[in-house]
Amino acid sequence: MTQFSEELIARSGYERAGFADRYDRHRPRPPTAVLELLCRYAREPKPRLVVDLGCGTGLSTRAWSGVAQEVIGIEPNPAMLVAAEDAPGVEYRTAYGQATGLDDGVADIVTCSQSFHWMEAEPTLAEATRILRPGGVFAAYDYDLPPAVDPGVDAAFSTYLARRREARAKRSIRQGADLWSKDKHLERMQESGLFRFCREVVLHSVEDGNAERVSGLARSLGLPIADPDDPELQCELRVDELEDAARRVLGSSIVPFVFGYRIRLGVTA
């Protein structure tokens, strides 16, 4: 299990020089509405402890600063934690989502922000419920790509994502796996039998963006392949076509980027 996780990190492209900084700069931050929703379902207006699994550069961890008394971000990739910024009440630890090293029942809320699809579902859910108190909340939430920006930009981004899916299918390190299927998060949670209540909630957030952010967001996406900088792959992806479309449509304008969020949450017994 750990060997698979280590191999996946090595092939993700997330360890490349400068990748973590690009990720932290261009990826969206969790909206306040997500945090408020999870607190409400945990029936705890100011959680004692929130644990953020697969926290990356800490975007989703720092969001809890001032909302929770204590926040711990768990991330197995040291290259991502290098870019993680400090914030009051926030701590980062190098560990895996299925082996946090935390005590039983210590957390009010456990989250996977844009990260559960990188993990082995069963052991991660078992670990999350182990460290949650009774009535605690686990949430796997993701934002939809592309963000809603402009018809021309959205279409170019969608075409780029289709090329990525084709490249991933050709180079997947685990043929036929559901690893990348976010639409099965709720199903996995329900089938685990670890939660007394599960549901999905959909909401959105709005952040400013420009043509540079379109490019940065596209280049902040991982891909499980042997060499993310492979010239053949870059030729297939043709990210320059997306960048040209963004510059042509947006120019130097700063416009709203609307990110749709899908939250799959479960409440422990």
Image (cartoon, rainbow, N blue to C red):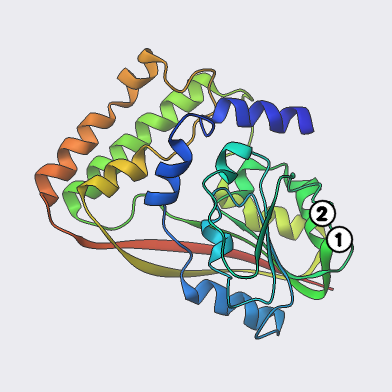
**Percent x, y for residue 171?**
52, 20
Front position in the image: 16 or 174: 16
**Percent x, y for residue 223?**
50, 31
| Numbered mark located on residue 184 in the image | none
Quarter of the image for the C terminus: give it. bottom right
The residue under the point 71% across, 53% down is 188
The residue under the point 48% across, 65% down is 30
**Percent x, y for residue 134?**
85, 75
Q: Which residue is mark 2?
A: 127
Residues tagged 2 and 1 counted as in contact (Cβ below 8 A) = yes
Please, what is the three-letter code of the amino acid marked with disc 2? Glu
Could you tell whether 180 is left or right of 165 in the image? right
The residue under the point 63% across, 30% down is 8
Q: Quadrant of residue 175?
A: top right
Determine the CA span between mark 2 and mark 1: 5 Å
Please, what is the three-letter code of the amino acid marked with disc 1? Arg
Front position in the image: 185 or 6: 6
Front position in the image: 162 or 153: 153
Front position in the image: 263 or 10: 10
> Please, what secondary structure does the residue beneath circle 2 have?
helix
